[in-house]
Each structure stands twice: as C-alpha cells, then as structure tokens.
Image (tube, rainbow, N blue to C red):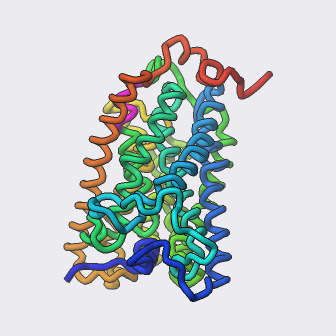
C-alpha cells in the first residue's frame, strides 16, 4: 500500500485537481486567508532582510553589499519569473512531461481572478506564498560562492537554475498524483528537499566549480560583523514559522503543531551545536549558536507537519551536531570553500531532516504521518534525497559550465582583492 502525505503543501495540492485555476463557488475562509497572508510576509522577511543580514555579517566588509545585493536580486528576479512561467512549471497539472515538470497552461498566471481558490484560500495568496519559497532557494546558494562570482554570472545562474532545477523539483515533490516523488510517497512538508537539499547541493557544486577564494586557508577570512549575523539568524527563526506553520495552508492544528516542533528542533540544534563546539574548542561562539539555529530550522522543515515533539527534539539535536562537523572539520579536511556553509548547513541539515522524517512521522514514534512501515518509508525518503542530489548536482554543473563559456563565472584576482562591492557595484558598504 502506497504511503500518502498528510496536511501541508502536499495534501493541499490534492485539492487543486483537476485544475489549479478553476474558480470555485465557495468563499475563502477568512481565518485561513488571514494566516496565510501573514505567513507569506514572514517567509519573504526571511530573505529580505533576514538572509541578507545573516550572510552579510559573515563576509568581509568589502563584500557586504555584494551579498545583500544578491539576496535582493533573487527577490526581484524570481518574483517575475514565477509570474511569467515558474508557477506553471511547478504546479500546472497538464502537459506531456507531468511526471517531471508542469505544463505551460498557467504562464503569466493565466486564468487567475479574484474568485480563484486553492483549498480554503485565494489562489493569489497561494501563488505568492509559493513565490517566497522560490525566492529564498537561489538566495541560499549565494552562501557557497560568496565573495568571488561575477554579478552578471549570478544573474544568469539564478534565472537558469530556477527554471531547470527548482521548478521541476518542486513539481516532482508537490505536484500531486502522477508526479515522480509524490507518487513515491516522499514526505516533505515545507521544503526540506525542494528548498534546502536542492540549494545545498547546488552550493557545493558551485563552490567546487569556482574554486576557493584567493588566500583561502592561508589568510584569515573572519566575519566582519557578527551582530548582523545574529540579527539575521533571529529574523530567520521568527520568519520560519511562516515557512513551516504556513505550509499547513490553514489556521488549524497541523499549523499549531508545526509551529511547536519548529521551536523545539531549532532550540535543540542551537544547544547541540553549542555544546559540541564548547567541548572541542573550549568556548561557545556566537557564530556557532547562530549556525545551529539555522541547522535546526532546516532539518525540521520536511518533518514539521508529521512529527511530534520528541521527534523534533531528536531531529534538532542530530542536525546541530552533524552540521557542526560538516561545516567545520569536514570542510577543512576536504578543502572545499563553501564560504558561508550553504552546503554544510542547508544541504546536510536538509538530508538529516528528510531521512529522519521517515522515522519520526510514524505514529509508533510519536508522529502523525500515515506511515505503517518505517523501513519502507526510510527507503522512500532516502530515494528522494538521492534523486534530488544527483539531479541537482548534474544540472547545476552543466549550467555553470555554460555560463562560464558565455560570460565567465569568476571575478579577476584584482577584483576579488579589491572586493566585490567596488568591483561589481562601485559602492562601499561603509564610509569610515
């Protein structure tokens, strides 16, 4: 018997068939709509200013504007691409390639009006909510190639990657019956696979293709303003309630439980990272606890609609400890320059959360998922992770190589030494 999802974006999409744009006679639920309007604003708040500050504080002062600019670029570019064709590719249920990607029946949001509903909320709200997910995913990748990619290359990369990687993966996971990972039974409540594994693997491939920053491993590249990073982490923590609890698409018990387990897992991951760092290095750092916060938020994302409090506690601790070692000792040992730990936190945290969802979603483990066979669900989760890793890695590599041939990926050594704020934008973050 095929395992099925409950609640969240996956279950919501089952309400959309046979067509996403069909106007319905029923009126939207005002409570659900009010909550989803709020959740949408919270998720956008995660990128600007949350992620912009989180990443901005971790780079050197000569590159703060470049990183913030890239977050704003993602917000503007992906919003328009989502309206033009992204929503259609992700959620249109027609088309000959429906197993892998949506059709073009909803380009320019064709068929949308003020009466269109998605479940109990206006379809326009659902479109905007999903748009904010699409916005933050390419912005997360910035953390892997910070301080060395051309702005022109970043623009091309975000647009092409969104088209060829994000939209198809979103469709395969959340697109309803007939799509690949949905039919497998992959559990991804709010984007552990679609957003975090996707972005983390793309980040790893990008930093490997670009190579390390000039002087990496030889000169100190310490964060220039950890105050910004902590403020950004706090904004991400608060905004993530929109990300996870909002994925219930209703003001109901599932949203309430998602909020609770998000808080538990995040706190556990922050303490887990802090404890391991304290034990190994003799001190607990502000950067460490902020990184632990994000690791916990990432890991609970796929599980938020199906696990209980105990599962959330374990997922949080596991992600905090695992991401600490991947973002520190593993990165140093292998020598790749994942500048701001996009892979070490989002990729690894997403994988930890996705796999453990298969365990803790089971009612016998305190969860609320329709999981009757834990071993089978773990295999399904692993298969979904493996497919996403391979697909994202291969397509990302090809995109980067093509862009390198067209405009070049990397700034010159002199431009990198000068800093991307001046060399790419002719501005300084600070006038002291």
Q: Quadrant where the C terminus lies?
A: top right
- Is residue 286 covered in magenta? no
Q: Report the front residue among 70 and 290.
A: 70
Q: Quadrant of the N terminus?
A: bottom left
x and y percentages locating residue 47 in the rendered image: 60, 50
Q: Would you identify the image quadrant in which residue 173 lies?
A: bottom left
Residue 90 drawn at (x, y percent): 41, 60
Q: Residue at x 45, y 22 (%)?
A: 410
Q: Is residue 208 magenta?
A: yes
**In this view of the protein, can residue 275 be seen by the observer?**
no
* Span colored in magenta: 205-212
Q: Residue furthest top?
A: 414
Is 208 above or below relative to 26? above
Q: Nearer the viewer, residue 170 or 195?
A: 170
Say which residue appears at 42% left-offset and 64% top-offset: 91
Where is 317 relative to 377, above or below? above
Q: Is residue 48 left or right of residue 393?
A: right
Residue 305 coordinates in the image, percent (x, y): 45, 75
Q: Residue at 53% of width from left, 79% of height from top?
A: 23
């Amino acid at each position: 018997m095929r395992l099925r999802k409950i609640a969240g974006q996956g279950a919501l999409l089952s309400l959309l068939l046979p067509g996403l744009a069909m106007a319905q006679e029923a009126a939207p639920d005002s409570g659900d709509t009010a909550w989803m309007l709020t959740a949408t604003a919270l998720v956008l708040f995660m990128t600007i200013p949350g992620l912009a500050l989180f990443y901005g504080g971790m780079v050197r002062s000569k590159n703060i504007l470049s990183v913030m600019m890239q977050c704003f670029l993602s917000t503007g570019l992906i919003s328009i691409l989502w309206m033009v064709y992204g929503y259609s590719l992700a959620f249109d249920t027609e088309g000959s390639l429906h197993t892998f990607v949506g059709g073009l029946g909803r380009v320019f949001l064709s068929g949308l009006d003020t009466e269109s509903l998605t479940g109990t909320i206006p379809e326009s709200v659902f479109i905007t909510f999903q748009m904010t997910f699409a916005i933050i995913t390419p912005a997360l990748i910035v953390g892997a190639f910070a301080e060395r990619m051309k702005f022109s290359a970043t623009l091309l990369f975000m647009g092409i990657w969104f088209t060829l990687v994000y939209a198809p993966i979103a469709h395969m996971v959340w697109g309803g019956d007939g799509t690949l990972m949905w039919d497998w039974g992959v559990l991804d409540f709010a984007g552990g696979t679609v957003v975090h594994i996707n972005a983390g693997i793309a980040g790893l491939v990008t930093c490997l293709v670009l190579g390390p920053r000039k002087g990496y491993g030889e000169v100190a590249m310490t964060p220039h303003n950890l105050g910004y990073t902590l403020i950004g982490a706090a904004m991400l923590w608060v905004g993530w309630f929109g990300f996870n609890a909002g994925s219930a698409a209703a003001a109901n018990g599932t949203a309430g439980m998602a909020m609770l387990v998000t808080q538990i897992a995040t706190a556990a991951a922050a303490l887990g990272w802090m404890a391991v760092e304290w034990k190994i290095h003799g001190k607990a750092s502000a950067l460490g606890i902020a990184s632990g916060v994000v690791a916990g938020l990432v890991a609970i994302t796929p599980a938020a609609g199906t696990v209980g409090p105990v599962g959330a506690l374990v997922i949080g601790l596991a992600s905090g400890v695992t991401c600490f070692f991947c973002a520190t000792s593993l990165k140093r040992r292998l020598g790749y320059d994942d500048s701001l730990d996009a892979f070490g936190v989002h990729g690894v945290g997403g994988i930890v959360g996705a796999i453990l969802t298969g365990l803790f979603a089971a009612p016998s483990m305190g969860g609320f998922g329709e999981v009757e066979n834990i071993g089978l669900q773990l295999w399904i989760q692993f298969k979904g992770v493996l497919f996403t890793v391979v697909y994202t890695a291969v397509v990302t590599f090809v995109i980067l190589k093509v862009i390198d041939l067209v405009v070049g990926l990397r700034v010159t050594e002199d431009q990198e030494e000068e800093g991307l704020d001046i060399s790419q934008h002719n501005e300084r973050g600070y006038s002291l």
